[in-house]
Amino acid sequence: MKDKEKLRKEYMTKRANLKSTIINKNSSIITNKLDSYIHKNNFNNIMIFVSFKNEIYTHELIKKWLNDGEKKIYVPYIESNIDQMKISQIEDFDKDLEKGVYNILEPKEKVKKESNNYDLDIIVVPGLIFSKDGYRIGYGGGYYDKFLSSVSDEVKKVGIVYSDFVVDDLPVDDYDIPVDLIMTERETIIPKR
């Protein structure tokens, strides 16, 4: 099996080459599925990443939830002085976010409040590649695995990814935390463990 670094490089190149029409079409299918799933399960406290580059595009879905006003939306940010990921609730996509570490949109300083992540119902987890048993390879910072290890098992962890980025298995380290569900434009996978 290839090591994580080789896989990361290979799939970063593959994702960088995706056409915007494919990204838009598949992102729309995936975020609609996610929206339905969240409504069906009455999840109200949602942590979701703000998409960057060719990730599944989440901006419109976040704006929709904020406009509906029924859900609390939490987005992650990197606390660079302690090299840790935290979350903060946002209420207005355009006013509450600015480019932060790695040029990713994150809550502005005045919006950041120490959010208690144990209130969450669901965490929408990004990943470059997911395996069918729920493990993932991200960008190598380890921020999500550290964060997920601090969250109750009751919190649903859902990975969203393009179907071509789901593989049979991946190298797994002791600290890797799997997701409970993977949504792609083609299928919803319940990992078998």
Image (cartoon, rainbow, N blue to C red):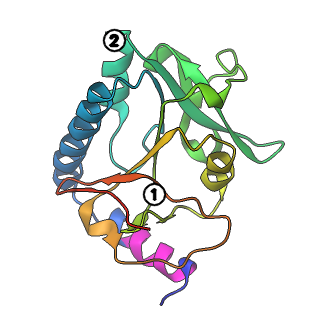
Quadrant where the C terminus sits is bottom left
Mark number for residue 127?
A: 1
**Residue 109, x across and y down, in percent:** 70, 21
Instruction: State whether residue 142 is above or below residue 74.
Output: below
Per the model, the C-alpha gap separating discs 2 and 1 is 26 Å
Q: 109 or 166: which is nearer to us?
A: 166
Secondary structure beneath dot 2 equals helix
Q: Are marks 2 and 1 in contact (CB under 8 Å)?
A: no
Q: Is residue 189 visible?
A: yes
Q: 105 or 64: which is nearer to us?
A: 64
- Looking at numbered disc 2 in the image, what kind of residue is underneath it? Asn
Give the magenta range.
Answer: 5-13
**Residue 10 is a magenta residue:** yes
**Residue 66, x across and y down, in percent:** 39, 16
**Residue carrying label 2:** 67
**Residue 191, x across and y down, in percent:** 37, 62
Give the quadrant of residue 78.
Answer: top right
Q: Is residue 54 visible?
A: no
From the image, give the main secondary structure of the stretch colored magenta: helix
